[in-house]
Image (spheres, coloured by chain):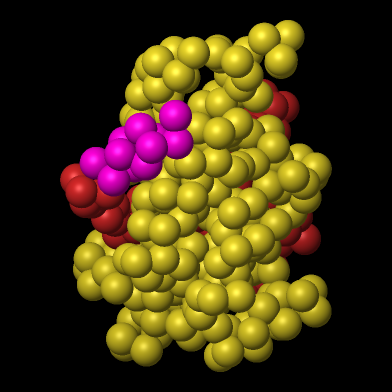
Amino acid sequence: MEEEQSTKPDRQKTELFEREFMPHLEALYNFAFKLTFNEDDAKDLLQDTSMKAYRFIHSFAQGTNAKAWLFRIMKNSFINDYRKKSKAPGMVDYQEVEAYYDSGKGTSPRDITVDLRAETVRDKLGDEVTLALNSLTVDFRTVIILCDLEGFKYDEMAKILDIPIGTVRSRLHRARNMLKAKLAAYAAQMGYK
Amino acid sequence: MGKLMRWLGRTFGDKTKRCPEEEHCLELVRLMLDDESTQEDNDYVLKHIDGCYQCYDNYDVERAIREVVQKKGKNVKLPVEVVTEIRQKIEVAK
Ligand SMILES: [Zn+2]
């Protein structure tokens, strides 16, 4: 079966690529950008992903989720080829927050987060949101991006990330705690105590 | 009347007293907002936050954060030339 599919005429492969994969390039590019923080790396990562997708198109089962399939390829390419290169701004100061949550103490930093609901605060939080998200380590950042920005379900995220669904759930929970703490800290810095 | 009292309790009640179910409730709130919860989870959450200031507060903050992340986690535009390059590379790879 696979053998038969892999010998698909090029025209068919190109058509399949255009139809199934092209519509997701923009989302993929955004994912790449949020992983690498860099336009050139994002372009390279997108091109690598696209070429791998084309090369392995015979292993894509039509009718299944093409977007999830592509995101999985990109995630793997990033881990294998790009992770070492990219540097996450603000990562260092954030380790403290992460350690705090790992210690189990800070599961709900509610004392400082209340103001996040105020529209005035949310409007002012622009770059801070990006900064807060970017300051999460890549594993935590990725689950937030996949869930909140790309709208993947937990079972799809499990496949993209090669982790059990329970891990998706707990990782997301911790990522949200960290993001909340970071945003609350920004809000407090801006005087919304 | 009961509803009003619960609202008052939520709004003006002792905000320093921590809810023993807070962590569990927050987990379920997140599942609910992610549309990954069961009906049973939802029933529990909605009933609980109706009477618990702290968990209602958490729920509110969670919704606010999602909104801001979705609004400000803005899209970067994919340059047209990148799409062209990809199509060209595929042509070559054929
Ligand atoms: Zn509660």
Decide: is A47 above or below A84: above
Decide: is A69 above or below A63: below
Tell me, yes or no, whether the highlighted magenta stretch contains residue A32. Answer: no
Residue B1 visible? The answer is no
Residue B8 in the figure: left or right of residue A76:
left
Residue A132 visible? The answer is yes
Residue that sits furthest to the left in the current view: B80
By secondary structure, the bulk of the magenta-drawn segment is best described as helix
Give the chain ID for the yellow colour.
A
Question: Which residue appears at 48% of the width and 85% of the height?
Answer: A90
Residue A9 in the figure: left or right of residue B27:
left
Instruction: Point out the stretch of residues depicted in magenta.
Output: B83-94
Give the chain ID for the red colour.
B
Residue B50 in the figure: left or right of residue A101:
left
Residue A180 percent location from the top left of the image = 52, 68
Residue A165 percent location from the top left of the image = 76, 40
Instruction: Determine the image quadrant of residue B87.
Output: top left
Between A42 and A99, which is closer to the camera in this rendering?
Answer: A42
Quadrant (top left/top right/bottom left/bottom right) for the C terminus of chain B:
top left
Residue A29 percent location from the top left of the image = 37, 50
Between A142 and B52, which is closer to the camera in this rendering?
Answer: A142
Decide: is B22 above or below B93: below
Question: Which residue appears at 60% of the width and 64% of the height?
Answer: A81
Instruction: Determine the image quadrant of residue A104.
Output: bottom right
Residue A130 percent location from the top left of the image = 37, 69
Instruction: Determine the image quadrant of residue A157.
Output: top right
